[in-house]
Amino acid sequence: MNWENEYFTRFSLIYYYPAVFTIALSSIITPSNYTSGGKLDPKQASYDVIYYDLAFTVIPEKKYLKAKSNAKIRILSSIDSLKLNLVNNYIVDEIKINNQISSFQHFGDILQIKLPDNITGMIETSIVYEGQPPVAPNPPWDGGFTWAYDSKGKPWIGMTSANEGGKIFFPCKDHPSDRADSASISITIPKGLSAASNGKLVDIQHTDSSSTFYWKTNYPIANYNINFSIGNFYKYERPFISIKNNQMPIIFYTLEENKDKAEFHVDMAMNMISSHEKYFGEYPFISEKFGLVETPYLGMEHQTINAYGNEFKYTKLGENLFDWLLLHELGHEWWGNKVKSKDWSDYWIHEGICTYADALYHREVTGEKGYHKKMSNLKNGIRNLNPIIPKRNASTDEVYQGDIYNKGSYLMHSLRFIMGDRKFFKALKEFATLDSFIYDNFVSESVFTKHFSFVGRQDLSSFIYMILYTTNLPKAIVTEVDSGKYKIEIHRLSIKFPIEIQTDKRIFRKIIGKKPIFMRSKTKPIIDPNNWYLWDRDFPTDS
C-alpha cells in the first residue's frame, strides 16, 4: 500500500508519522469520542457567529494553553442563554457579555452562558480560559495537539481538529453550518520560535522572553480551519500571478533544517495552482496568501496555511517529481474552504471533488492515459460497504470513511462521461465560481444535483442518488441470443445513459435505458471497457 492509499483508507491501516519525537505521557489528556456536526441544537440555531478574535499563549514545556476568545455574535431569535462548545479540559476563568460579567456553567463539553433579559441584535462575548489541550492520538484523523521536537531539539507544535471541531481549543458554535465572516488569531510563544496561521501576518511583537504573532483573515472560515503551527521555521516566499492577473504571495514555513527544499516545493505548488485555476477558477484566497507549514503530522487543509508533513517524499508523475499530499491539500482551498457544506452528510463534496481534482491534475501532466490510470487507482480503493450519505444531519463520525474520497471522485468521473466534457467542465467550474455556491453560501447534494442536471440538460438525480445514498450499482447482463447476436441489459437504472460497448470491431457509444439493446459481435461484447462507471461486478459479495 502506497502513501497515498494509506491517507485515503484510514480504516484499513492506521498511519503513524515516523519522524516525530512526540512525548506521550499518561498524564496528558487525549481525545476520546469528540465529534462534530449532527443535528443543530435549536438554541445554537438562534444565533450566528460573525467574528472570532482569538489570543493564545502556548507554553510548550507544560503542554499548556492560556487563551482569550472575543467574539461578535448576532442573536437571531429570543434566547436566555448562549450555548457554546468547549471541551472540559479547560478551566474557564471569566466570561463577559457586552463587557459585563456573566454567570455560566461548563459541563459535558458545553459552555452555557447566561444572557441579559430580552437581548437582541449583536452582542460581544469575552471568555478567558486555560488548560491542557487534548493530545492527538493519530493526527490528522484523530485530532488534538501534537507536541513534538525537531532534530535540533526545538519545540515543533501542530494542531488538528477537522473531525473534532474547533471546540478542542476555543469556545465556538461547533457546527459546519456556522462560519465566521472573519477571524483574528494571535499566538504568543517563547522567543526564537515562529507561529504560522490563517490569512495575513499583520504584526509581530517581541518581549525579552516571548514573541506574539498577529494574524487576520477577512474570508469566511470554518472552526476546524482556524489553526496555527509553531516551530523554528524558515520562511520562504515567492509571488504568484493568478489566472486573472492578480498577485499574491506563496509562503512556505519549513523547518530551518529543510530550508534548502523550500524553493523546489513552492515551484511544484505554483504549477498545481495554475492547473487548478484552469478547472475551478482563480485561487480562492488571492488577497491573502497560499501558505504551507511543515508539521509533525501528515497534513490538513487549513485555510491559507495548509499543513505539510510528507517529509518531501516525492514520487514521479510523468517526467516530473510529484508530491501527492501537497496537491490534495491545495485542492481543498477550492473544495471545502471556498465551496463548503453545512451538513457533514455532504463531506463527499469536500473530499470527493477534491480527490477528483487530483485526477484532473494527473490529466494536465500526463494526459488522458494518466487520468484514467489515476481513476483506476482510486477505484481500487473503493469498498462500497456503506452509503456515502447514510443520513442527513450527520456527524463527522457517522460519515467519515474512505469512500467519501474515492467513490465520491468516481461519481464525478461518471458524470463527465454522461454529460460530455463541454457541459461537465462548465458545470464544475460554475460550481466553484458562481456566487450562490461559494464563501458565505453553502452547498449540498441537492444543490449539486440541480446544478449539474441543469447544465447537463438531463435529470441526473436518480443516478446521483444511487451512488451517494445506496450501495447499489448498475448491473450489466450480456446474453447471446443467437450466433454472434447479443442482448445487453443494464439493471438498476431508471434513466437512459450513455455506455461504451466493445465488440470484435471497435468500441461503440450507445444510449441504453430500461429496454435492452442488441448488438452483433464475433466475441462477447465488453461493457464499459474504459471504466467510466462503477458496476456491481466490481464489488462481488459472498451471497
Image (cartoon, rainbow, N blue to C red):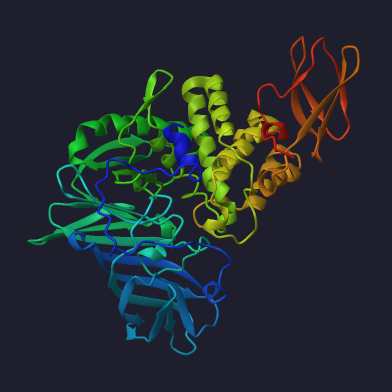
At a point 31% along the width and 66% down the height, the residue shown is 54
- Image quadrant assignment for residue 293: top left
Measured as percent of width and height from the top left, residue 129 is found at: 30, 74
- Note whether residue 73 is visible: yes
Tell me which corner region of the image, top left, top right, bottom left or bottom right, holds residue 219.
bottom left
* Count of numbered labels shown in the rendering: 0
- Image location (x, y in percent) of residue 416: 64, 32
| Residue 284, x across and y down, in percent | 44, 45
User: Furthest residue to the left?
Assistant: 208
Q: Is residue 442 visible?
A: no
Image: 501 above or below 224: above
- Horizontal and vertical percent position of residue 464: 70, 44
Image quadrant where one finds the C terminus: top right
Residue 357 located left or right of residue 512: left
Q: Nearer the viewer, residue 264 or 502?
A: 502
**237 to the left or right of 226:** left
Residue at the spot x=46%, y=65% of the render? 174
User: 467 or 425: nearer the eye?
Assistant: 467
User: Is 503 drawn above or below residue 259 in the view shown?
Assistant: above
Q: Decide: is 392 above or below 350.
A: below
Instruction: Name the outermost residue toward the front.
Output: 542
Seen from this angle, which residue lies furthest right? 482
Q: Residue at x 35, y 30 (%)?
A: 268
Residue situated in front as seen by the camera: 457 or 43: 43
